[in-house]
Image (tube, rainbow, N blue to C red):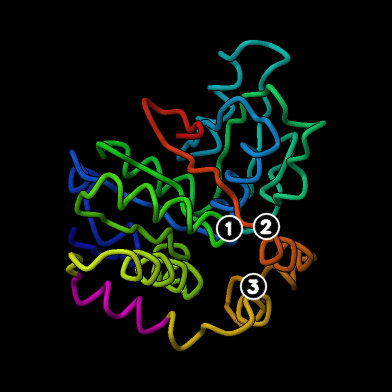
Amino acid sequence: MKLNVLFSPANVDELYFTKKTVVMADPLRTSSTIVYALEQGAREIIPVESVDFAVKVSGDAFGGQTLLAGERNDVKIEGFALGNSPQEFTEETVKGKSIILYTTNGSRALVKAKFAENLFVLSFNNLEAVAKLLLELNRDVEILCAGNNGLFSLEDSVCAGRLINKILLNSKGVEFTDSALAALELNKKFKGNLITFLKKTEKGKALISSGAGEDVEFIAKLSESLIVPAYDSGVIKNY
């Protein structure tokens, strides 16, 4: 198994992912929201790459069983039922529902990697489950960091490093690229308290400034999840 990390979707063309095994990391907040929504009984998540397309898809969807959710630059989109805070995705709200999700970074990264043979969603909360599955598949893996408007994101990269570390602890036959080694070293550097770390990142600070600081603590405190969201034919369900 060879591991590679892409620090931003902007660095590659969508055809790069063809027939590959890909893991998308956007823990603040899209990945965590997807994991939590599926845990709370959401039927499926449909990630989209634009607000206009989200509205179009919702217009074609089966009435009453679909929710529009998303944010633009951390702010809930006007007219949408939900934003991108995992705390909004309660069982009462999402159970049995299809959720059309647009986010500034995470949903767009997922759509860009749509040609992958396997496409999974990674957060800090389902690291163990994702690592276990990847070890079972025993395939080369591209870890795609959603980034921050096309730029580097520290929490995405540390999350990627934590996944690599978990895989290394359970397998001796692992190779990694320079970028994977860099992510592994970042994880070692920031392996302390997760809440403290997340609050120091640019995205963490932005969420706090926008009034969504509780999400940072909520995401960091979520218990270890067995959910592995998997993208297939435009839809995300538990693997």
| Mark sitting on residue 223 | 2
To which residue does mark 1 refer?
A: 125
Q: Is residue 238 left or right of residue 109?
A: right
Magenta part mainly helix, strand or loop? helix
**Residue annotated with mark 3:** 204
| Earlier-in-chain disc, 3 versus 2 | 3
Of residues 113 and 40, the one nearer the viewer is: 40
Residue 43 relative to residue 230: left or right: right
Residue 218, position in %: x, y?
A: 74, 61
Q: Amino acid at mark 3?
A: Gly
- Which quadrant does the C terminus fall into? top left
Q: Are marks 1 and 2 in contact (CB under 8 Å)?
A: yes
182 inside magenta stretch: yes
Can you say whether 219 is above or below 165 in the image?
above
Q: Amino acid at mark 1?
A: Asn
Label 1 SS: helix
